[in-house]
Each structure stands twice: as C-alpha cells, then as structure tokens.
C-alpha cells in the first residue's frame, strides 16, 4: 500500500457521528484527518470536547466558512439536515463527499419537499448523488463523487427486504417495521425528547405513521420490487445510548417457508463482511453489535400462517452512520472495504 494518505475532513466533528468518525478513522491506516469543523464549539480543541479521544493528534475545530478545501481529498458531512446542501454545492470538484445527513437521500425533489418542509437547494447536484447502502449499491458507489449515507432506520430493513423482494419471496404490500432506537440517534444538540427524565425508565413511540424515514425505506424497497411500496413504520425511543432493533413482519408468497427466507438471506450475504444471518429461529440483540459495523439478522416463523418475522440490529452510530460512511469512503477510493472497521462488538 502507498504511504500517501487520503486527506479527510469532518464537518460537524463536535457531534456524535463526528466523534464516531474520529474514533473509527484513528485505526484507518490509509487516511489522515486534516480538517475538523464545528459551529458553537468552533475554536476549541477536539480533545477538549471529547476527552476520550484527546490522545489523537488532530486539527482544532474551525467554522466551515474558514475551511481551506485544498487541504482535503474527501469530506464527511455530519451536519444537521438542511445545512449540507449549500455547503456541498459550493465545493471544488476535487473533493469527494460522504453526506451523513438526509439532504441527498431522497431522489425525487417533491418527496424531499413533502417530508423536509423546504424546496431542495441543490437539485442539480442531487442527480449525480449515489445512495450509499454499501452492500446494495457498491458498484455505483465505486464511481461516485457524492454519496448519500442512508438513514439509521432505513439501513437494516433495506438489507433484510431487498433480496426477498427481488426474488419475489415476500409481498411488497404488507410490510410492518417496528423499530427501536437508542437516544444518540437524535444527536448531541440538546432537545426536550432526549432529556434524561423523558428517556429513562420508559419507552415511547414517536413519528408514528409519519416518520421521515418511511419515504426513504419506500424508495429503496421500490427499487427492489420494481413498483411502488408503502410501509407501516413505527419508531420508538429506548432508554439506551446506542443501537437499533427492527422487528420486520412480512407476508410470504405462496409456497415460501420461513426457512426459505433464512436460507435466501444467508446465501445473499454469505460473502459480505458486515452482514451476518443467524441460524434459523435465533434473534439478535442490540448489544451483539454495539460499537461495531455489523448488522445481525434472525428469521423466525410467525404463528400466523404465511407470515415471517425478521429481527435485525445495528449500532446507529456505526453501520447506521459513521461506520457505513467509512465503508463508503473505502469503496469510493478503491481501498479494502473493511479498512478501519474490523472492530469487534462491545458485549454486553
Ligand atoms: N446520530 C445518529 O445516530 C445518526 C445521525 N445521522 C445524521 O448525521 C448528521 C449528524 O448527526 P449527529 O452527529 O447525531 O448530530 P449532532 O447534533 O450530534 O452534531 C451536529 C454537528 O453539526 C454542527 N452544527 C450544528 N449546526 C450547524 C450549522 N448551522 N452549521 C454548521 N455546523 C453545525 C454541530 O456543531 P456544534 O457542536 O459546535 O454546535 C455538530 O458538530 C445529522 O444530519 C443526522 O441526522 C445519520 C445517521 C445516524
Ligand atoms: C432517535 C432519533 O431521534 N432518531 C432520529 C433518526 C436518526 C437518523 O439516523 O437519521 P437521520 O440522519 O435521518 O437523522 C429520528 O428519528 O429523527
């Protein structure tokens, strides 16, 4: 391998996904972090904001408007929705981008406007963006300049259902996704929903029947099935810091068994380093993937004839955000896809 390192910038380094990018890139031998930005925390050393990473030699966080783009080959945008569109649209062409926000995930501008409440500010750029669910879009990601990293909830469900819809093993018109997330999914900026008293000792549903990840899931499943898909998607907030668990309830096509579903998923992901299909009847826990880039899935028979349940887990900050972002960077740059990501889960 060449000694020349890829120069990487992280916009939004003082947030949860920014810190997770630094943690992962600390073990990435082909890259070096040359730019970090923040908003309220601009001007502060990264290690002062995140003492657990203070041993790493890093540039001080600056405002985006003070960035010198000649110092980077690739940037990760870990900024709030809506702020990325204008930043990316103004970048010089030599800079590759992996955007962790939702700004470029929806490919129909009208759908974006409906769910994010504003007209998309970079519709021309949207046309060249590639959707970054690595296992499903790897060939396009290899050639992309701008990759839209998927949302945390849409990642496991698309990995579970895409192969099954493509091979017509399940029906596209009867999909229920019951999802549970840790609180880091809401980011580090203070908000009422993430106050200790609002999270501890209980769980609650939110965005029920109308969460903005539903259209992203539907877009991906429509690509797989070849026709429009509408899903029942209900997220819940759990009293835990990290992790997403999705129980996915689907109806199988005639003649298909739950064992067939497990076998089809196991075959599809046999050579994938980050997707593991458990033995039939075994279901995963969020603590089986904590801190790692893995998605684990288990398939169980439903007592209702003709139906099957798939349970999938990921760490929202790793495969659901920063880990998949580094996986996409590796693919975009022709590096080994697992570089920096071979971290075992922290159990329990
Ligand atoms: N958390 C998760 O599990 C996931 C998050 N994402 C997406 O990734 C992105 C980052 O998420 P997350 O790290 O959780 O968010 P955080 O709220 O933790 O961090 C946001 C970052 O953006 C900076 N920032 C805030 N406002 C502005 C602004 N107006 N201009 C420039 N910088 C700004 C903040 O700086 P400062 O701290 O100085 O204010 C901080 O560095 C979001 O779009 C999120 O939706 C995607 C998948 C999963
Ligand atoms: C617990 C929680 O609040 N989760 C976030 C999703 C986080 C994520 O991955 O997605 P985005 O990048 O689209 O924000 C939410 O429901 O809005």
Image (spheres, rainbow, N blue to C red):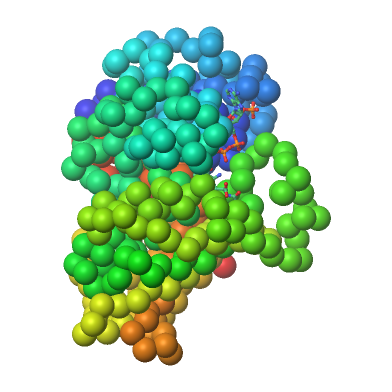
Residue 287 versus residue 251 in the image, above or below: above
Residue 218 place in picture, x, y as percent = 38, 53
Looking at the rendering, in which quadrant would you find the N terminus? top left
Query: Going by the image, does 316 lie left or right of 274?
Result: right
Towards the viewer: 211 or 287? 211
Residue 75 versus residue 24 in the image, above or below: above
Tag count in the figure?
0
Q: Residue at x 30, y 78 (%)?
A: 252
Instruction: State whether residue 161 appears in this view.
Output: yes
Q: Residue at x 58, y 40 (%)?
A: 16
Looking at the rendering, in which quadrant would you find the C terminus? bottom right
Query: Going by the image, does 45 lie left or right of 172?
Result: right
Towards the viewer: 230 or 336? 230
Query: Going by the image, does 241 lie left or right of 136?
Result: right
Q: Residue at x 73, y 57 (%)?
A: 199
Instruction: State whether residue 270 appears in this view.
Output: no
Query: Going by the image, does 191 lie left or right of 156?
Result: right
Quarter for ligand 1? top right
Residue 29 place in picture, x, y as percent = 34, 35
Towards the viewer: 124 or 68? 124
Q: Quadrant of residue 259?
A: bottom left
Q: Residue at x 64, y 52 (%)?
A: 183
Towards the viewer: 300 or 32? 300
The residue sitting at the right extreme is: 197
Residue 127 place in picture, x, y as percent = 28, 29
């Amino acid at each position: 391998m060449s000694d020349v390192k890829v120069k990487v910038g992280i916009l939004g380094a003082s947030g949860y996904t920014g810190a997770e990018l630094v943690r992962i890139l600390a073990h990435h031998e082909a890259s070096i972090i040359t730019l970090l930005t923040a908003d309220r925390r601009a001007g502060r050393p990264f290690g002062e904001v995140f003492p657990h990473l203070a041993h790493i030699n890093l540039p001080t966080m600056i405002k985006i408007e003070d960035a010198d783009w000649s110092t980077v080959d690739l940037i990760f945008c870990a900024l709030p929705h809506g702020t990325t569109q204008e930043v990316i649209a103004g970048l010089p062409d030599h800079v590759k981008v992996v955007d962790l926000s939702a700004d470029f995930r929806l490919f129909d501008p009208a759908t974006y406007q409906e769910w994010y409440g504003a007209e998309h500010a970079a519709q021309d750029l949207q046309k060249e963006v590639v959707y970054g669910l690595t296992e499903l879009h790897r060939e396009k990601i290899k050639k992309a300049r701008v990759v839209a990293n998927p949302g945390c909830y849409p990642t496991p469900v698309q990995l579970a259902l895409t192969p099954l819809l493509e091979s017509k093993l399940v029906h596209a018109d009867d999909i229920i996704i019951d999802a549970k997330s840790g609180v880091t999914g809401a980011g580090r900026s203070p908000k009422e929903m993430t106050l200790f008293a609002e999270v501890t000792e209980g769980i609650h549903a939110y965005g029920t029947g109308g969460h903005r990840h539903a259209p992203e899931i539907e877009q991906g499943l429509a690509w797989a099935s070849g026709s429009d898909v509408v899903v029942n998607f209900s997220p819940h907030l759990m009293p835990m810091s990290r992790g997403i668990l999705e129980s996915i309830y689907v109806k199988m096509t005639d003649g298909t068994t739950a064992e067939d579903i497990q076998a089809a998923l196991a075959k599809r992901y046999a050579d994938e380093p980050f997707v593991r299909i458990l033995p039939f009847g075994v279901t995963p826990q969020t603590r089986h993937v904590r801190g790692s880039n893995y998605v684990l899935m288990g398939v169980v028979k439903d007592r209702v004839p003709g139906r099957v349940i798939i349970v999938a887990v990921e760490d929202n900050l790793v495969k659901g955000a920063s880990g998949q972002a580094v996986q996409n960077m590796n693919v975009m740059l022709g590096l080994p896809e697992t570089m920096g990501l071979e971290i075992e889960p922290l159990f329990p």
